[in-house]
Image (cartoon, rainbow, N blue to C red):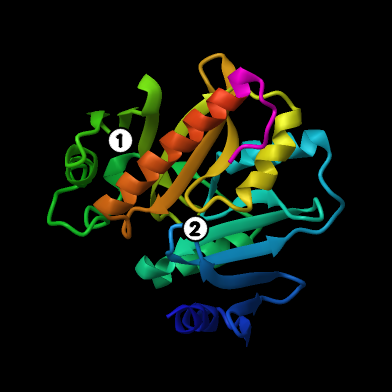
Amino acid sequence: EPPDAITRVASRYEWSVTRDDARWVVDAGDGRRVLAESSSAAAGDRILQFRRPLSGAPPSPPEEADFLRRNARTAHASFSTGPDGRAMLVATLVEATLDDGEIDSVLRSMLAGGEAVGSKPLADFDPTAYRTPADAGEWEAVILRESLGHAAIAFQFAGPRAVASLSLERGRHKSVHIFFDRSDAWGDQLVQLIAICAPAPPDWHSKALTANASLTLGTFALATFGPLENLVVTRTQLARTIEPNDLLAAVTTLARIADRTERELIGGKGGAPE
């Protein structure tokens, strides 16, 4: 249950926790507080949303771009803007698959101000990170087969990376890049997914940050692929907790968000990303 899990994690670090109905406040001192709230998502799943408001005035256009670039390198949480236009860190976990380790990583990352994603050779990771008897370097192939393979989604896998190719509505296609050689600031192996939308004009940066507050799977970021900086949608997840259905849900969701956003950007609709 969320209250037990949040309290257990907070007690490890002697953080205080206060609860009001379905809302919890984790206070680590020095003005560092994270709000957690349980609610129902559009699909009916119960979700646990974390928010940490950041001090200062609403970000300027250059700061908005910087927050989006940091989102491509940040694990467990992402930068967003709230109703008042001020910056905040946000994260969402699905309660049905809630794991103490995920809550621990989210709270530590948010209280530290967002922890960067690093890159490590696969040989440096614990071969038991994924819960199968597979040897190091083989569980990636296992989870790809059990998720994308079973869903008949084409993918190419080479070493620590894979690319999934999805067929979407109206004959459109979208690729999702999957990186298995990522780690967080504490050395835990991550799976990072990135789907490219399109190059975005500066007036879209504010829209993307605002949209991040309501995205359940994924976050908008800026990342350079080839010669161009693109608006992308990305997600990171702990390797030791990810299951085939988690990977499949993330891949399909990111592909649809990226495709819809690409059509809005190229079509010049000017609306906010959804």
Residue 84, x across and y down, in percent:
82, 55
For residue 85: magenta?
A: no
Q: Are marks 2 and 1 in contact (CB under 8 Å)?
A: no
Q: Which residues are magenta?
A: 265-274
Depicted 270 relative to depicted 215: above or below: above
**Left or right: residue 4 compared with residue 126:** right
Q: State whether residue 111 appears in this view.
A: no
- Judging by the rendered image, the residue that carries numbered circle 2 is 42
Depicted 14 relative to depicted 73: above or below: below
- Judging by the rendered image, the residue that carries numbered circle 1 is 160
Q: Nearer the viewer, residue 77 or 15?
A: 77
Residue 246, x across and y down, in percent:
33, 52
Q: Nearer the viewer, residue 64 or 137?
A: 64
Q: Quadrant of residue 209?
A: top right
Q: Residue at x 31, y 58 (%)?
A: 240
Q: Residue at x 24, y 55 (%)?
A: 130
Front position among marks 2 and 1: 2
Depicted 41 relative to depicted 141: above or below: below
Looking at the picture, which amino acid does disc 2 mark? Ala
* Residue at the extreme right of the image, as rendered: 57
Q: Quadrant of residue 211?
A: top right
Give how far apart the Cα atoms at labels 2 and 1 are.
34 Å
Tell me the quarter of the image containing the C terminus: top right
Looking at the picture, which amino acid does disc 1 mark? Pro
Depicted 269 relative to depicted 55: above or below: above
* Residue at the extreme left of the image, as rendered: 133
